[in-house]
Image: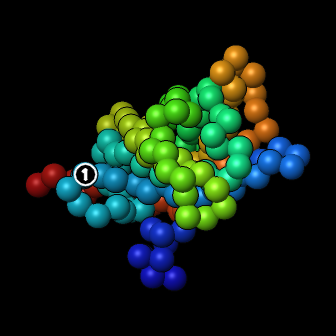
Amino acid sequence: MTQQEAVEEHGSFQCACGDLTLCGDIEPTCIIDPTCPPSNIIPSCTDFWVEVKWEIYGTVVPLMAGDFKVTAAFEAIGASGPNTSVSDKVPVLSGKYSTGSKEGPERDYKDRLLIKNSTNLLPPGVYLLVAYITYTDANGNPGPIAGMSDEKFVEIFPKPPSS
């Protein structure tokens, strides 16, 4: 697998909505510097962002209100280090709305989660990046919608000693 293929992997959404339809995609990427391409190889003690882009489409989209909870979790592979996660809340109605070209109306979203790794939150090692999104309706009740991507590996490498 090339680095570009690794950067382009993404997950999907699921919905248990009876006769209504809802589908979607979710794609996380790691960004060290917003002016540079994404990278899954990050120097230790360096802050970075996990940018999560997702889209939902289908007949249920115009009926939705409430919030998405966006979470980026890092699961240590082997003896790499601790597991950790960062979350954010994104209003459903904040997504760019269009009548869609797939299976009905759609909304597109993007959120950036800051990973404060300058404090060595993730020590050097290899981690599985799991980005997942859950939904709560306008009354704060959990809804039957979830999206997840667990196809990305992230390497935190030790910085060489300063000379």
- In-front residue for pair 139/88: 139
Rendered residue at 34%/61% (across/down): 38
Q: Quadrant of residue 151?
A: bottom right
Q: Is disc 1 placed on a helix, strand or loop?
A: loop
* Residue 131 to residue 91: above or below: below
Q: Position of residue 51 (x, y in %)?
A: 42, 49
Rendered residue at 44%/57% (across/down): 29
Rendered residue at 52%/33% (across/down): 93
- In-front residue for pair 98/146: 98
- In-front residue for pair 127/105: 105
Task: Identify the residue position indicated by label 1 in the image.
Answer: 34
Q: Position of residue 101 (x, y in %)?
A: 55, 64
Residue type pointed to by label 1: Pro
Report the residue that reaches farthest toward the left: 163
| Image quarter hosting the C terminus | bottom left
Q: Position of residue 39 (x, y in %)?
A: 36, 62
**Res. 25 visible in picture:** yes
| Number of numbered markers | 1
Q: Quadrant of residue 65?
A: top right
Q: Residues within 10 Å of mark 1 (few under 14, many from 20)?
A: few
Q: Position of residue 75 (x, y in %)?
A: 61, 49
